[in-house]
Amino acid sequence: MAWSHENTKHPPLINNLTCQKFAQRVVPNAGRSSNARIDSTFMPSNNFFHYYDFTFPPEDETNSMKAYVHDVKHLELLTRTNQHDRLAGALGILPNHLIQLLRLTNPKELPQIVNDLRFTTFWATYSIWTKRQSLNRTYWKIIPECCKFVKNKTTTLEKKRKRRTKKAELDPCQNPFHYLSLKKMCNPLKERAVARLGWVK
């Protein structure tokens, strides 16, 4: 509501049922979308830490790091860190050797650093994936009809529709308020209609 007063010509009108349902639920401090904090500009990965970067093939980098890392234990952990599976690293799964190195160099802030690395890497990868999906959809919209494989594409879409139908039957709940905790000593409203925001011009 505060945002609408500054960015729209007319404030929205909210359905009474929506107001009643929100009054019964505990509003979270932060939204469920966690990738909003990720910067959309991606810089090249660090020369010492690229366990998640597919442009660097996993290899023994001991000789190239010797001049910069004098501690033998740290050098070994760094080398084995960059031999980590690239797909696992892109999904936020950290190398065990990196965690060992952090435990040796900064044990007090280890949980915070590990969680931040996992969180940031995963959502950055997800952001790249969503952009790729968007480009893929755009590509299939603009290419000529003669270049499309209509038969195979139709078969694939039919299979996907069947899977979605089965999933919808198993999980028919469409109420977004079920993601919010119900307040104590409060019974949820029995109306079957899903509350929606009613925007007016």
Image (spheres, rainbow, N blue to C red):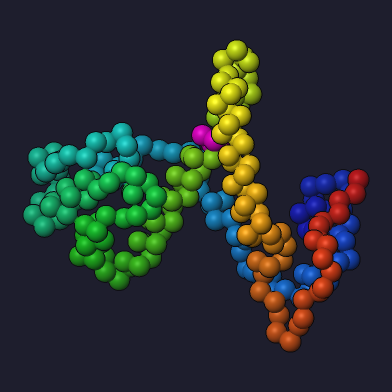
Q: Picture quarter containing residue 71?
A: bottom left
Instruction: Left or right? Give the position of 31 relative to 17.
Output: left
Position of residue 70 relative to residue 171, above or below, is: above
Position of residue 16 relative to residue 57, above or below, is: below
- Quadrant containing the N terminus is bottom right
Q: Picture quarter containing residue 177?
A: bottom right
Identify the residue at horizontal 61%, vertical 54% (top origin).
Answer: 167
Q: What's the magenta bit mostly, secondary-structure-wise?
A: helix
Identify the residue at horizontal 58%, vertical 19% (top origin).
Answer: 148
Near-viewer residue (49 or 81): 81
Near-viewer residue (103 or 54): 54
Instruction: Left or right? Give the position of 88 relative to 33.
Output: left
Identify the residue at horizontal 60%, vertical 12% (top origin).
Answer: 146
What is the x, y in percent for residue 23?
A: 79, 74
What is the x, y in percent for residue 119?
A: 44, 56
Instruction: Left or right? Give the position of 192 relative to 184.
Output: right
Q: Which residue extends farthest right?
A: 201
Region rendered in magenta: 131-135
What is the x, y in percent for residue 124?
A: 46, 46
| Residue 71 visible | no
Near-viewer residue (169 or 96): 169
Near-viewer residue (62 or 6): 62
Residue 132 belongs to magenta span: yes
| Residue 3 visible | yes
- Quadrant containing the C terminus is top right
What is the x, y in percent for residue 2?
A: 78, 58
Position of residue 137 relative to residue 9, above or below, is: above
Identify the residue at horizontal 51%, vertical 34% (top origin).
Answer: 132
Residue 151 belongs to magenta span: no
Count how many numbered circles sit on residues in the image.
0
